[in-house]
Image (tube, grey):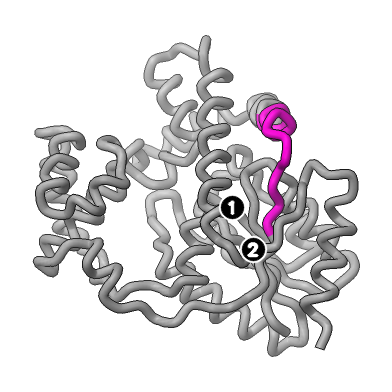
Amino acid sequence: MTPVCIAGPTGCGKTAAALAIAELLPVEIISVDSALVYRGMDIGTAKPSAAEQAAVPHHLIDILEPTGSYSAAEFVRDARRLAAEISARGRLPLLVGGTMLYFKALFDGLSTLPQADAELRAQIDAEALARGWPALHAELASLDPVTAARLAPGDSQRIQRALEVIRLTGRPLSELHAASRDEGVDWPLFSLEPQDRGWLHERLAQRFDAMLDAGLVDEVRGLRARGDLSLQLPSMRCVGYRQVWEALDRDDFSDLRERGIAATRQLAKRQVTWLRSMPARRVIACDGPQPLPELLAGLQRVLQP
């Protein structure tokens, strides 16, 4: 079966839609979410429950410790392999999530880039500790202005990667991105998008409140107690986790709700911007009167032989 993708901003109802589809079609879900890959991060990621995962096979969830990292290239490799395996079992691969970088890499293909170098990354981290990430961003701007222009001065993860590539290859990341790409996929993409921004904002506020009520602060407190995690890691920079970690650092939770909701809204805005750059997507209003029937009808059309 041809794999089908369902994307959308956080809080738009992607998981509920996928589970509803699974009640009607023989599907297996491939998570397209850079936070769900981490074990021990359940509340702040809105991870599908054990019962939901038992009811429908899920993939690319709980595959890494939060000390690790999972690149877009690794996702593309795993997603393609899993899609082929699921199709071979006579089931529909359903790729569901909101990490737009993963979707973009899947559809556009990936440029040939060097593997991560742990020693070099440690060196760059040490430089950042001494000079600050804005200074390294300025250095990147002199070496690769195209890449630097799209990165914030505090975007440590991407600044580190861009400098790492330059030091490993002697060529700017932007040049390597344009030089060579493997072939992307041409799978149907359904995009759940709100037509009313206020509708999504209300849902995001309710969602973050529910996470706080479910014990998000205690979850992050437990992660901190491991002793091997920090805000330098991709896992702890996830929306919600960063804000709680910083509140624990300050021992001040007075503005945690406000900061968490604001960060979640910013994430959703970035996700929608990414989606609008994907012209082949089929848009379904997630705040419309009947988003699920519309999604099911669209699925039936693309799955017809």
Label 1 element class: loop
Contact? badges 2 and 1 (CB < 8 Å)? no
Q: Position of residue 226 (x, y in %)?
A: 41, 39
Q: Secondary structure at mark 2?
A: loop
In which quarter of the view is residue 61 placed?
bottom right
**Residue depth check, mark 2 versus mark 1: number of the one nearer the observer:** 2
Residue position marked by numbered label 2 in the rendering:
281
Q: Quadrant of residue 52?
A: bottom right
Q: Dividing the image into 4 quarters, which one contains the N terminus?
A: bottom right
**Residue 50 visible in the shown view:** no
Magenta region: 191-204
Identify whether 103 is placed above or below 241.
below
Report x, y in % for residue 29.
69, 67
Circle 1 crowding by C-alpha within 10 Å: few under 14, some 14–19, many from 20: many
Residue receiving disc 1: 98
Residue at 19% across / 41% down in the picture?
137
